[in-house]
Image (cartoon, grey):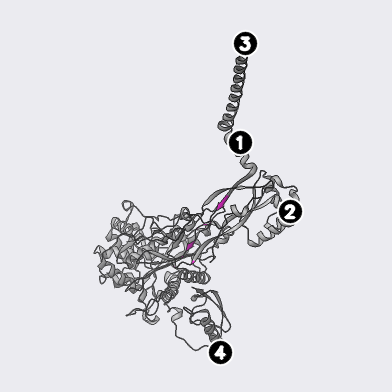
Amino acid sequence: MKRDRAFVQKRIINLVMILLALMGVVVFRYAWLQLVQGNELAERMRWQVGHDYSVQSPRGAIVDRNGRELAVSTMTKSLFVDPNHVENPKELARDLAPLVGKTEQEILADIAVGGGFSWVKRRLEQSEYEAIRLLIREKNYAVCLGFRDEAKRYYPNDVLAANVLGFVGTDDKGLDGVEQALDKYIKGEVTESFIYADTRDRPILESIFSQHGYQGDKCKTIQLTIDSAIQFIVEQELDRAMAENDPLAITCIVMDPRTGEVLAMANRPSYNPNRFWDYEQEVWKNRAVSYIYEPGSTFKAVVAGALLQEGIVTPNQVFVDPGYVTFSGKEILNWNGDSFGTVTFADVVKQSVNTGFAIYGNDLGAEKLIDYARLFGFGDQTGIELPGEEYGILYSPYEMVESDIATMSIGQSIAVTPIQLITAFCAIANDGILLKPHIVKSIKNANGTTYSETRVEEVRRTIDSPTDKTLVGLLEQVVASGGGGKASVRGYRIAGKTGTAQKVSEDGLGYDEGRYIASFCGFAPVESPQIALLVMIDDPLGSFYGGQVAAPVASRIFSQVFRYLRIEPSDAPLGLDSDEIGAEVGEGDASIHGVQPKEEPPRPAEPEAEAPHEEIAPEAARVPDFYGKSIREAARLANEAGISFMAEGSGFAVGQSIGAGEVVDRGTTVKVRFSP
């Protein structure tokens, strides 16, 4: 009995040991699968039943100061191929090639990548998408072809403000302009999802998992200070100036001197950011911030301010012009190669007398000359929210000799950017206070709330208020009766300075014979400046004086912007008739001995729009003023005038391809731009 009991106990013990051993194996195996191979097996199982799916939200919009869209994103389809499920690559390539604009060899290369995914074409046009979807249905290509949603950047105004906006690459990355500078704010957000799929990799319950129209939290809307109506006016006039003067390039900036806001910034030549790849990279650059050049006589406004501030001159101080001066062996002439005789300092500024600025500049001295240049913002970045801004070039005052001081005083031997120059003029217009320029007005969150807002930022005072008022008066006379006469607009008080600078040769060792940069920089109305304007024309063909080629462009822009902003004429207008202005004077640049302008500019004519309305021939017609009119009113005016017109946009007229008052052949078509 005891032996049977011992036998049973032994059997039980053996069974328990066996069970414990088996349990240990199971536990060990379970632990191995969970702890060692768990991640690998889970990932393998995951890919057997589905796949990851990336959903990208549209990129944030860019709008102008009035909310008009300048850059937007729309969701579009992108085509991919699953090489593992392609049964007949040649047939697929043959069918697909004409629909996507690629060669059969290119598509075969996409398939040859192998794996389960390869892009064929991203961001399809709607017509391409519809054609490919029909092909998939007819040829049963759903097993190997598929679509994914991606955001596509679109610039509804094409060329308008292209150099400011920049463009976006295929991976939603900003590559230039505002798109690049503020990429971290407006870049679309990518969210990863997991899609369960069948054996043919088709999503199960696609309607549930689809996230079409997904809007991320990170993509913010950028509101610029740009006014698209003013931008259109500027670009229209730059196109006209390109046709008239055939220059290498033109740059124009319009700013509000009271706030530092950029209202318009344009370059010619430019490009269409919707097809940026069709243009040379040089055209992508925003010359307004990245181009450095010798400013010529426009810089004399800063020098005059320094001379007045330091008490070296007064407006009525008499100066006897010798006609030429020599410093450190370098001879400096006046623009006309002659003497202006006995004149006041006000005349030195108005007639841009080189000898006067060279002599007085040396009285000021190198250190103070450089100090005032820096006070006005030269030699440093302005900090505007755009990529590629240059610093410009300033001498070290301790390395300057008398000839360097003299040439810098007439706007040579210094290199500036257009944004630096107009910012300095804005300081003069703003009672001597330098403001930081900005082109971003605010940044809005995806839900419409304000993320940040740019405020007026005072940098420093440049010259005292009484000195500044005196300087403004001198610059006003430049436009009223001096070399800037062609920048005038009847009824408005405008202050400014023209410039005609020699172009530095590419090797930097001298100047190119017969090549100049013509410019005008100024502001208006003088009694309460609201608009500052710079026009810089690089290497015009034929006439090259700033007063001849840049000032008329400025006049036309001023005139249209005054009307658009409803700026009333001055109470005491100083706009003068052409016979009251007197002979136009040059700017005194390009006058270092041996490199003189080849012709004396003619007397200035009044802006074309201000000419008296003489009788016209029966076969001719006078272009009406369409500004502020509705499309219906514009059509009536055009019909009454005997011309045709082409409407662009909707709302009210903000620009026209042929200026008001011009005489044209009857039946001529005038393009009129309308904006809400």
Question: Residue at label 4?
Answer: 618
Q: Earlier in the sequence, mark 2 or mark 3?
A: 3
Q: Nearer the viewer, residue 210 or 89?
A: 210
Q: Earlier in the sequence, mark 2 or mark 1?
A: 1
Q: Earlier in the sequence, mark 4 or mark 1?
A: 1
Task: Give the residue type at disc 4.
Answer: Pro
Q: Nearer the viewer, mark 3 or mark 1?
A: 3
Q: Secondary structure at mark 2?
A: loop
What segment carries the magenta color? 54-68
Q: With 466 as the anchor, is 646 left or right in this view? A: right
56 magenta-colored: yes
Task: Give the residue type at disc 2.
Answer: Asn
* Distance between mark 3 and mark 1 Cα atoms: 55 Å
Q: Name the residue located 71 percent from the left edge and 46 percent from the top edge.
A: 85
Question: Residue at label 2?
Answer: 140
Q: Chief secondary structure of the magenta span?
A: loop
